[in-house]
Structure formats: C-alpha cells, structure tokens
C-alpha cells in the first residue's frame, strides 16, 4: 500500500518536471477519434521518437497538444505549467508539405520568423537579429542560401530552413513533425547532428518519426502510439517485438521485424 | 483637360477626391496582398456584394427618419453592417456545414446582391428622399462628391493603411505558416479576423469611388501584379500599395475630367494595364523572360546532344541541333565535325563519363544531385576531385581491356 503511494507520487513529480506532459488527450475528426485518451510524459534532456503506423495519430498528437487542432479533451503541461504560458520555451518544426513554397519570401526571412515573438509588432530587425538568423542557418549548413527564394530549395534544404527557424527561437523544448520525411541523406545527417547537439546542451527533443530502422541509432526514448498509447520508455525497454506488434499489428511483416534485429 | 486632371489642376474638390482615391488604392493594394497570400482573395467579392442591401436599408432608414438619405457615413455604416453579416455567413457556411468555401461565397454573394437590387427597385418607387446617386455605389463615381465625403474616404483609407503596416508580421506568418504561428503563440483566428476587418473597411470606404462590383479588382490585381516583381513579402506589399495607388489616382483623375466615365471601371482598366505589362516584362516571373529562358535551355540541350552524337560518330537528324553546331563552328554544313568540334565533343563525352561515375559513388552524393546532363563538372567539383575520378576512369578502362 505504502509502496504504491510512493510510486504514484513519483510519477506526479516526474510529470511536474516533464518538459512535455500530456494527460487524457483525445482528438477526433468527425466521430472517429484519431487520438484517444493519450497520456505521455517526456523525459527532460532526452530525444524521444513518436512512432506508430500511418494514421496512428502521431502528428495529430503534436498538433493538438500545441493548439493547432482543437482537442475534445485533455491537458498539456510544459515544464509543469499550461502550454499557453510556455509558448516561448517551445520550438516547433511543422511538416514541410504544410506550407506553400512559392510564397514570396527568402530563406533569411523565414528564419527571422522565429524571432517574431521577441521582435513584437514594431521592433526593428537589427544587425544582432540578422547575425543570429545567419548563425542558425550556419548550424544547419545553409548559410550560403540566406537570400534565396524558398521555392528554389530542394526538399531537404527546405526542412533545414525550418529547423533553423526553430533554432532561432532559442527554446528549451523542440517538437518536430516528421523532420526526416522525404529528405536526402546529407540533410538527415545534418539534422540529426543538430538535434543531438541540442540534447547534449540539455534541451529536450520530441520528433514524429516513421523510419523504424533508424530509431535505435537516433533516439533515447520511444513513444509508441496507435490511436491509443501502446508503450513509452527507453529504446531498450520499448522498442521490442511485442510492443511493435501491438502498435503495428499485421502491418509489420516478419521480415521487417527481423531486419530491425530485435531480440 | 486630362492633363489638368492628372496634374491635379481641376480645382480643390477634384484634387481632394483624387487624393482620397489614391490613399484608398494604396490601402487596398497593401491589405489585398495578405488576402492574396492567404489565398482568400474571393472572400472579398462576397463582402463587397453583401454591402448593397445595407446601403439600401440605410437609405430607407434615413429617409424614414426624415432625412434625404444621402449622408455618406450613414450609408457606409449600413454597408459595413450588411457586409459583416455576409462575411459571418460565409465563414459559418464553410466551417459548420459541408459546403466548400467557394460554394459558400457564391451563394452569399448572389443572394445578398439580389436582395440589394430588389431594395434599390423599391427605393426608386419611393417619392421621399433623393435616391439619385445610389446606383453610383454599383460602379463608383466621383461626380458630385462632396468635400466631406472625400475627407471621410481619405482618413479611413489612411487608418487602414496604418493598421496593415502595424500588423504586417502576424499577417505574414498567418499567410505563410499558420500552424507555426499558432505554435509560437500567435492568435491566428484573431489575425484572420483582423485581415477580414481590414478588407471590409477598404471595401466599404471604396464603395463610393470604385463601386461594389469592381472593388474586388482593387484588392486582387495590385498584389498579383506586384508578385511578378519581387520574391519578398515586404516588397510585394509595398509594390502592391504603389500600384493600387497609381491605378486609383489615374482612374479618379480621368473620371473627374470626364464625369460621364464611371470611376471604378477606369481604375480597373488602369490596374489591368499595369498587370499586363508585368505579366509580359517582369524579369524573373514574366512570360517573356520565361520564354527566353526556355529557349536558352533548349539550345543548350541541343548543343550538348549534338556534341555527344559527334563524339559517338552518330549522324545528326535534327535541324536545330545541326544549325547550332554550325553556328558555334563545331560542325560543317554536312554534319562533319570541325577540329574545334571534335575537341568539344571529346570534352563533353569525358564530362558525361565523369558524371556517371560520381553518380554511382555515395561519397559524391551531394555533387551528383546537381547532375542535369548540362552542367560542366568543373563547376561542381574541385580539380583534385576530377583528377581522382579521371584516374579511376583510366583504371577501369585498363581493367576492361
């Protein structure tokens, strides 16, 4: 009895400290829930992958937690406070396909958008802001592209620009929606290096991820979802055949499971 | 006479009207840019058509209260109220029912306009009030405009302009990436509401000058034209404001000189002339430059194919290829390569072999992405890298022999 109490108290503390804690989140399109009563507690200073089959609600979970979609139910706390009060500590990298790349704007202007909260309505863009934006571009290897129109970039370069914009915010929590979808190998390497450096600097990274073969190499923790939460924890604990079978069902062929070299 | 109008020498009133119209054109161009970038340009058409019942009802109300029904502020207030009702209806229909936004716009636009026309007909049968001039709200007119009317328009347009400049950052973010805007704490629905409020203000203020049927053109044509000239949001906004101002200035001045000409259509035609010029002549996105670019590219492809054919000793059948090779001095009229031609052909073939090699080698992945069959490999690789590749080609050649 006392033991149970102690452990539940422990989870409460973990939740209060968590950079990103979701409780009972439900989102539905029409009458069919896309995410149902999901709890998630992200460990600080770690890289967490949200994985699950297509249509499992991975992106929906992130979007609803950020208020981009309106959830039916649920609460989200960021470092123990409601998400609305903590926007300045959150950087978000949306899916590349979510914007119109023929929009009249240059690479540097997109990165400067990450500084809009600081600049306010009328604050002038000063050399210090420009230097910061260029610095962020350099961190993703895109410093030579600052004055290009965004439509001239390849898919991987567009993704790196989005990451640079998130870096410019100087946030503590980084939420990324499919950052590796449809990017070239060079971009994937550049992005993962940046994310790991963020983690090593004590930041927390959460990414929707679709490539099971790189989960163990890239991430510390895994959150498995298929509308419901399936499992959550370190890669060693959670990234296991039984959990994956639970999340993917028959969709993951035996050969794929073997290829993942699971014990 | 026209020159007098354009140089603002038709008297105080005409000058005031022209300047008011210019400010209005600038406000419409600047505000319309964000509407265009948010891809909601047609909503403004619903808004403008929805003003008509409001104008008519306001007239009837003012007559019923004993006035002559021609107070501009009263009429514009009525217009704003019914336009807001139309706007709410469009967003309710597209958000809460299964109707798509274009269908919602179409229904609201036609129903409100129909109601307005019916009310106008009713007004014409009324004996009270001075209904003459109400139909000017359809196509716009500067004739008989009072000094106070022009001042109201000028002040409202200036306020709108100032508000757009104040809100330019939220408007940009809501247009480009509303999801990111929400994530970093911007209230995107409120920004959208402000944008619609601005459009409503421009529409209502512009009713008298441009008329409700054509005000949509003043909101859409300038940004579309400006987009040809720049790849930067802030520049597109400024250019669009300038173009809208020019179109409105010329249109209002001409119609002041020739009172029979309706103002709205002239403004739209001036705007269209600027659009047509930009469509043809803009340096990057214009039709002419696209055509030239395409021709240049086609010539490069033909030349390259021709050189590779010479290198392989294949006959060339395409007249354009042959003509280009001859013009460059690479081949004789009968298709036989000249000395320079042989050299260039050998170079093209060597380049192609190098490219094929680096495209198979993961170490050159980034460079290999630039392969398009045309780019000289020296512009992508360093001399050392090319030496490395050439030595591998030589080795392969020996191995195969």
Image: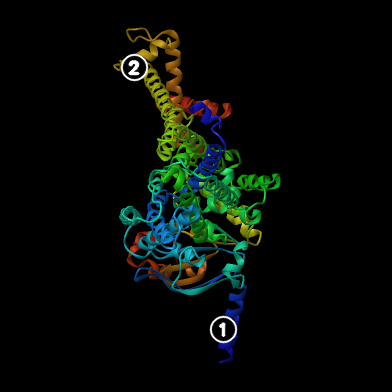
Is B233 situated above or below B126?
A: above
Q: Which residue is mark 2?
A: B320
Would you name the residue on which mark 1 appears? A8
Q: Position of residue A262 (x, y in %)?
A: 44, 64
Quadrant that contains the C terminus of chain B: top left
Q: Residues within 10 Å of mark 1 (few under 14, many from 20)?
A: few
Let me know if residue A137 appears in the view. Answer: yes
Using the rendered image, report if marks 2 and 1 lie on a common chain.
no
Q: Splitting the image into 4 quarters, where does residue A16 fall?
A: bottom right
Residue at left offset 60%, top offset 83%: A9
**CA gap, disc 2 to disc 1?**
80 Å
Furthest residue in direction left, as rendered: B317
Quick check: marks 2 and 1 in contact, CB under 8 Å? no
Chain containing mark 2: B
- B176 or B33, which is in the foreground? B33
Name the element at disc 2.
Answer: helix
């Amino acid at each position: 009895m006392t033991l149970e109490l102690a452990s539940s108290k422990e989870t409460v503390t973990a939740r209060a400290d968590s950079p990103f804690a979701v409780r009972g989140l439900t989102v539905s399109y029409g009458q069919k829930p896309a995410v149902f009563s999901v709890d998630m507690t992200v460990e600080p200073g770690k890289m967490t992958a949200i994985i699950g089959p297509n249509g499992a609600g991975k992106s929906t979970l992130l979007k609803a937690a950020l208020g981009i979609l309106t959830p039916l139910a649920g609460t989200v706390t960021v470092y123990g406070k409601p998400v609305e009060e903590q926007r300045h500590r959150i950087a978000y990298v949306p899916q590349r396909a979510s914007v119109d790349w023929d929009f009249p704007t240059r690479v540097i202007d997109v990165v400067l958008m990450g500084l809009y909260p600081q600049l306010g309505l009328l604050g002038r863009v000063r050399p210090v802001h420009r230097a910061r934006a260029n610095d962020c571009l350099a961190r993703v290897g895109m410093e030579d592209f600052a004055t290009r129109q965004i439509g001239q970039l390849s898919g991987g370069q567009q993704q790196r620009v989005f990451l640079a914009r998130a870096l410019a915010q100087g946030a503590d929590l980084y939420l990324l929606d499919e950052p590796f979808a449809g990017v070239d190998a060079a971009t994937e390497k550049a992005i993962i290096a940046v994310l790991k450096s963020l983690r090593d600097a004590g930041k927390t990274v959460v990414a929707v991820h679709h490539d099971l073969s790189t989960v163990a190499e890239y991430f510390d923790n895994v959150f498995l979802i298929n509308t419901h939460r399936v499992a959550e924890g370190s890669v060693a604990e959670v990234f296991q055949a039984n959990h994956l079978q639970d999340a993917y069902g028959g969709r993951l062929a035996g050969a794929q499971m073997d290829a993942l070299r699971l014990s | 006479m026209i020159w007098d109008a354009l140089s603002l020498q038709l008297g105080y009133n005409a000058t005031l009207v022209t300047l008011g119209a210019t400010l209005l054109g600038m406000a419409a161009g600047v505000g319309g840019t964000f509407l265009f970038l948010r891809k909601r340009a047609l909503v403004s058409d619903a808004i403008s058509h929805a003003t008509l019942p409001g104008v008519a009802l306001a007239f009837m109300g003012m007559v019923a209260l004993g006035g002559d029904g021609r107070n501009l502020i009263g009429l514009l207030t009525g217009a704003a109220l019914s336009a807001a009702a139309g706007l709410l209806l469009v967003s309710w229909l597209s958000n809460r029912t299964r109707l798509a936004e274009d269908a919602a716009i179409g229904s609201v636009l036609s129903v409100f306009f129909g109601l307005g026309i019916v009310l106008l007909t009713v007004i014409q049968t009324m004996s009270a009030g001075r209904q003459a001039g109400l139909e000017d709200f359809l196509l716009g007119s500067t004739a008989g405009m009072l000094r106070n009317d022009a001042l109201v328009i000028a002040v409202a347009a200036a306020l709108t302009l100032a508000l757009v400049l104040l809100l330019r950052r939220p408007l940009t973010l809501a247009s480009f990436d509303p999801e990111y805007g929400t994530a970093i704490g911007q209230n995107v629905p409120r920004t959208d509401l402000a944008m619609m409020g601005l459009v409503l203000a421009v529409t209502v203020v512009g009713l008298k000058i441009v008329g409700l049927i054509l005000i949509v053109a003043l909101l859409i044509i300038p940004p579309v034209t400006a987009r040809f000239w720049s790849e930067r949001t802030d520049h597109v906004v400024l250019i669009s404001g300038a173009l809208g101002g020019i179109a409105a200035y010329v249109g209002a001045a001409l119609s002041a000189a020739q009172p029979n000409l309706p103002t709205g259509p002239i403004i739209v035609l001036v705007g269209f002339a600027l659009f047509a010029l930009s469509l043809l002549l803009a340096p990057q996105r214009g039709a002419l430059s696209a055509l030239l670019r395409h021709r240049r590219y086609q010539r490069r492809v033909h030349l390259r194919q021709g050189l590779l054919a010479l290198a392989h000793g294949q006959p060339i059948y395409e007249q354009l290829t042959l003509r280009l090779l001859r013009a460059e001095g690479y081949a004789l009229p009968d298709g036989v390569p000249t000395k320079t031609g042989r050299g260039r052909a050998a170079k093209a073939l060597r380049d192609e072999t190098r490219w094929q090699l680096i495209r198979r080698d993961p170490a050159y992945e980034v460079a290999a992405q630039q392969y398009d069959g045309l780019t000289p490999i020296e512009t992508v690789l360093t001399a050392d890298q090319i030496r490395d590749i050439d030595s591998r080609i030589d080795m392969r050649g020996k191995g195969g022999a």
